[in-house]
Amino acid sequence: MANSRSSKTNRVRRQLLPVLLATAMVSVIPHVHADPLAPAGRWEGKAGGSASTPPMGWNSWNAFRTEVDEDKVMGAARVLVDSGLARLGYTHVNLDDGWWLKRRAGDGRLQIRTGIFPSAATGGPEGTSFKPFTDKLHAMGLKAGIYTDIGRNACSQAYDLHSPNLPQGTTAEREVGLEGHVAQDIDLYFKQWGFDYIKIDACGLADFVPGSDLVKQQNYRGQAPLIERGSINRTDIGAVRRRYEEVAAALKAARPANDYVLSICAWGMANVRSWGKDVGNLWRTSSDITPSWTSMLHNFDSAAKRALYAGPGHWNDPDILHIGHEAFDASHPVEVRSHFSLWAMINAPLLVSYDLRNGPASLLAVLGNADVVGLNQDKAGHQGVVAYDSDDAQIIVKTLGDGRRKAVALFNRGATPAPVTLLARHLKLSDSAPVLLRDLWSKQSSTFTGEKAFTLAPHETLVFEATGKRQLENGVYLSEIPGAINVAVDGTRQPQLDPTIHRMIDPWSSTRSGGSRPQYAGWGGAQADATPYGQALQVAGQGFGSGIGILSGSRLQVRNDAGHTQLIAAVGVDDSTENTRKPVRFRVYGDGRLLAESPAMAFGGKAHRLKANIRGVKVIELVVRGSASASGEAPPVVTTWGDVQLVRDAGGGR
Ligand code: GLA
């Protein structure tokens, strides 16, 4: 959509940009400390909402777009219950766009389109109500989800103009989004109508550009975009975040029992991949999935390297599943299993979105694979980490439960067969002891020692549960337990775009542009077993198969749930750093007290061995600080917490 903002506005925005960016960066810090690197001494991970494991259930969008109705939704709900999927955890039944009629003039109360939701025609002073609908779902043991937009207008009002189910009436009556009505609407949805889950889209902040054809032809109120789809630097990150924070606060007030789920749908834009964890329970990491293989790759990539930003209560969301359609319909069983396995491995929400009433049993069997669902729903909440990476094939490893069991996915991204050798080392298991593999699709078991070769069919994903002798018998590497880590400050300054995401032919613009340029910031964020820029961890020529890569000016928090007694690491400036001049210092804190620190470390210096006694400590904090003397303009230093691990005694596992 053309941006017709006046050049004067643009000039003012450009002058304001440094200020806006500075504001945005400050607001990325969960609790604004005077010194964001000072240890907090307590867990700062988010507390609001209830999504201790990734949400599962059904969403109406990919199935019906705006042509949703009560029969279709209740039909899906019945299949969830009758098929046993609900018992496996598929309990959320989420309405998407298309349910509304208008915002009533006078009191601003939202009215439901009763032509498609007949049970909402309750009459009386309220006009319409979703209470009968949510009551029915609750009586079936299910949960009810609703959809809205953070701005004034919803996505369908920009992109589904053909729809018979767009809001009706005056300009004001068609402003069905939250803007200006946060407290009123959240109260309505959660206290009066009894919804449990809300997905909040962001088209209202992006697509209703003053003076645009859309705004003129549809007679909308234009709004200068806070999200510019084509430019992260022209997006007002702080303002977008504050909008969602306002809703999070309203939800807390409406549901003090904390029994709600907040789903942020800003499509990976506005740097949400970095701050989503502090505001909502899940946040979209990319644009909408479409039923094509490469769209699935694109969406998978947008979340797959963000393991350290997710954990119990807060999840990367690469979008609802597109199982049931085109490249993922019942005639593509390999692709269906891959899509499902990958979402499971990276702790994505498992929200099915096809017409369940008419779906083939073979698809229900995939969704009903209790072993694969189980690894997604594992209570520890450790997102899978990429252990081998290439554009052709990947190996993703997820640590389950107490750290003893692993799940591993071997993933052929390409259209030709791929040779993939799995190493015990990929699993952080001993090379010299047998590893037991159980295939979670075929249910066959096998063992290997050291390594095992596979040939994957095109687009195939094999998923195994793996057990063996752990490399660390008395502890865990931090990169095995990303769900126990909160990236309080990741050291990134100017938001940078992630260049590692599969660039598909955009289904909306096709090739009518110079290329596909995803606008997902967060590049340079902390990574498990890789540097912030995706390189192998290495300090002065010494490689580390395990560790955390993070920029200087950072603070990580680690929950010591398992009561480990020692933290051990080999720390230093990573060989891949762009800034080779600035010295840094590594510090370990336990419940706010300094436990260990490195000397000033410079590029080329050998890794320094750090040990900290963490007996009895609940929250460990790992801080890397650059020397104050170096210029503030210089890029942060790439640093490595090599082999960083928690063990039960000083000599354990080495
Ligand atoms: C956006 C969202 C989708 C869906 C539609 C509804 O595109 O990203 O998931 O909710 O809006 O219009």
Image: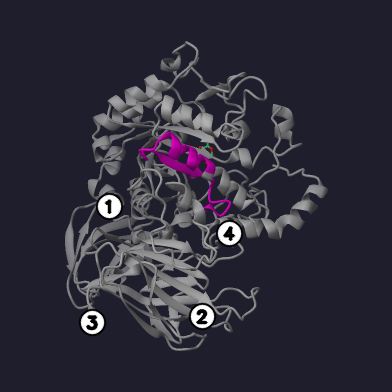
Q: CA distance from mark 2 to mark 3?
A: 27 Å
Contact? badges 2 and 3 (CB < 8 Å): no
Among the two numbered marks 3 and 1 on one chain, the one whose residue lies closer to the N terminus: 1
Q: Nearer the viewer, mark 4 or mark 3?
A: 4
Q: Earlier in the sequence, mark 1 or mark 4?
A: 4
Question: What amino acid is labelled 4 in the image?
Answer: Val
Residue at label 3?
651
Q: Position of residue 35 (x, y in %)?
A: 53, 66
Q: Earlier in the sequence, mark 2 or mark 4?
A: 4
- Tell me whether the residue at label 2 lies in contact with that at label 4, contact meaning CB atoms closer than 8 angstroms: no
| Magenta residues (range) | 246-272
The residue at which mark 2 appears reads as 584
Q: Quadrant of the C terminus?
A: bottom left
Q: Secondary structure at mark 1?
A: loop
Q: Residue at horizontal 39%, vertical 55%?
A: 459
**Given the current orientation, which residue lies at the most extreme right position?**
8
Query: What is the C-alpha distance between the residues marked 3 and 1?
Result: 29 Å
Mark 4, other Cα within 10 Å: few <14 / some 14–19 / many ≥20: some
The residue located at (60%, 39%) in the rendering is 203
Q: Of the residues under marks 4 and 3, which one precedes in the sequence?
A: 4
Could you say which disc has been placed on residue 464 in the image? Answer: none
Residue placed under numbered mark 4 in the picture: 26
Helix, strand or loop status at disc 4: helix
Q: Which one is closest to the eye, mark 1 or mark 4?
A: 4
* Amino acid on which disc 2 is placed: Val
Question: Label 4, label 3: how many angstroms apart (C-alpha)?
Answer: 40 Å
Q: Earlier in the sequence, mark 2 or mark 3?
A: 2
Residue 379 bears which disc, if any?
A: 1
User: What x and y, as percent, mark residue 596?
Assistant: 38, 79
CB atoms of marks 1 and 4 within 8 Å: no
Who is closer to the viewer here, 114 or 628?
Answer: 628
Residue 565 among magenta residues: no
